[in-house]
Image (tube, helix red, strand yellow):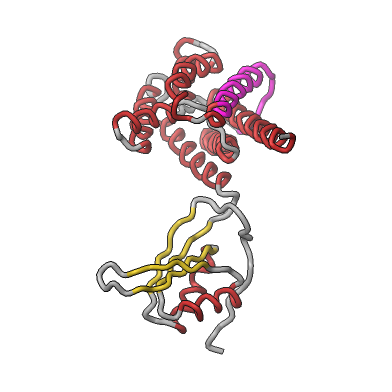
């Protein structure tokens, strides 16, 4: 129990750090440079620009009904982490607004957009990595998926587009273009932080020489492989399928192995979102088998 409590504490601490990073970028670059955002944060910026309402209050008020709607499908732990993420973000935004500081970027809106994207993406990526969320339109999109069968990605795109369109009430087209740059950078940072800073590929290999291929991959590249039992849907022939997790740079090395051992092998490369367990970014190098 003590170990579990310690893990929960560390996760909550990481989420609080993530929301703090996000809040700093939100106040220092979005609010200070008239850069819009999507989601609930974007709505809070609209209310701040038009009616001077503190964004921290707006985000809390909008997220309360969304949390009530999402209680049933979020799950107990995710629900608690989401409440923590929403509250800590609002507190950070409230505090940072009241701290006097100046960041000299020479009135360069492009730099402001880049920094806004880096801070928001890094902060949200850290929150996601430790199982939290900051609520918002994610909850609403998930609800539409459950009730109406509409994909989450499509609903998020609709919500974000509508909020950005509403943001044109206080930003011009020039600043909207910078907002899109910030959003792109933010998404890249979220993916980078969530994936732990490295990209991984999975490779499915169908070959008549599975033992030899697996042995060579293990010995020459330093990656393990897993046998999966397969059967051709058309031919009915039983075959062994190899599954290997690799770095992108190692894909070409496996292709070279296949070209030598079994040129007729079938291989499929897939993107792997995350690897949990014993996977080191660097293991070994393929030695030229033709030597």
Residue drawn 38% across and 30% down? 141
**Which residues, given as a range, are shown in magenta?**
80-105
Residue 44: image location, x then y, percent = 48, 19
Residue 156: image location, x then y, percent = 38, 33
- Quadrant of the snapshot with the N terminus: top right
Residue drawn 55% across and 53% down? 275
Looking at the image, residue 88 sits to the left or right of residue 191; the answer is right
Residue 267: image location, x then y, percent = 40, 70
Q: Residue furthest right?
A: 2
Residue 124, above or below 231: above
Asked whether the viewer can see residue 49, the reply is: no
Residue drawn 46% across and 28% down? 37
Looking at the image, residue 32 sits to the left or right of residue 262; the answer is right
Helix, strand or loop: magenta stretch: helix
Question: Number of marks in the image?
Answer: 0
Residue 148, above or below 240: above
Q: Nearer the viewer, residue 238 or 49?
A: 238
Residue 159: image location, x then y, percent = 36, 28
Q: Nearer the viewer, residue 193 or 100?
A: 193
Residue drawn 53% across and 27% down? 79
- Quadrant of the snapshot with the C terminus: bottom right
Q: Quadrant of residue 163?
A: top left
Q: Residue furthest left?
A: 234
Looking at the image, residue 210 sits to the left or right of residue 118; the answer is left
Residue 35 within the segment the image draws in magenta: no
Residue 89 within the segment the image draws in magenta: yes
Q: Quadrant of residue 108?
A: top right
Asked whether the viewer can see residue 229, the reply is: yes
């Amino acid at each position: 129990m003590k170990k579990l409590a310690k893990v929960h504490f560390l996760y909550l601490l990481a989420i609080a750090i993530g929301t703090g990073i996000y809040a700093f970028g939100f106040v220092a670059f979005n609010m200070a440079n008239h850069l819009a955002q999507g989601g609930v944060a974007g709505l809070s910026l609209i209310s701040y620009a038009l009616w001077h309402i503190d964004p921290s209050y707006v985000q809390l008020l909008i997220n309360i009904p969304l949390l009530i709607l999402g209680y049933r499908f979020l799950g107990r732990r995710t629900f608690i982490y989401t409440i923590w993420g929403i509250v800590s973000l609002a507190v950070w935004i409230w505090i940072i607004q009241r701290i006097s500081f100046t960041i000299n970027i020479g009135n360069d809106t492009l730099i402001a957009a880049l920094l806004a994207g880096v801070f928001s993406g890094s902060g949200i990526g850290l929150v996601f990595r430790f199982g939290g969320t900051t609520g918002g339109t994610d909850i609403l999109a998930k609800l539409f998926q459950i009730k109406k069968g509409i994909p989450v990605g499509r609903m998020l795109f609709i919500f974000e587009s509508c909020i950005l369109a509403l943001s044109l009430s206080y930003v011009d087209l020039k600043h909207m273009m910078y907002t899109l740059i910030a959003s792109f950078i933010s998404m890249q940072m979220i993916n980078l932080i969530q994936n732990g800073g490295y990209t991984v590929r999975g490779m499915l290999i169908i070959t008549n020489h599975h033992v030899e291929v697996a042995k060579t991959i293990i010995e020459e590249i330093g990656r393990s492989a897993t046998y999966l039992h397969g059967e051709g849907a058309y031919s009915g022939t039983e075959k062994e399928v190899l599954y290997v997790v690799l770095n992108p740079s190692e894909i070409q090395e496996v292709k070279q192995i296949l070209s030598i051992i079994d040129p007729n092998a079938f291989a499929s490369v897939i993107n792997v979102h995350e690897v949990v367990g014993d996977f080191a970014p660097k293991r070994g190098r393929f030695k030229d088998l033709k030597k």
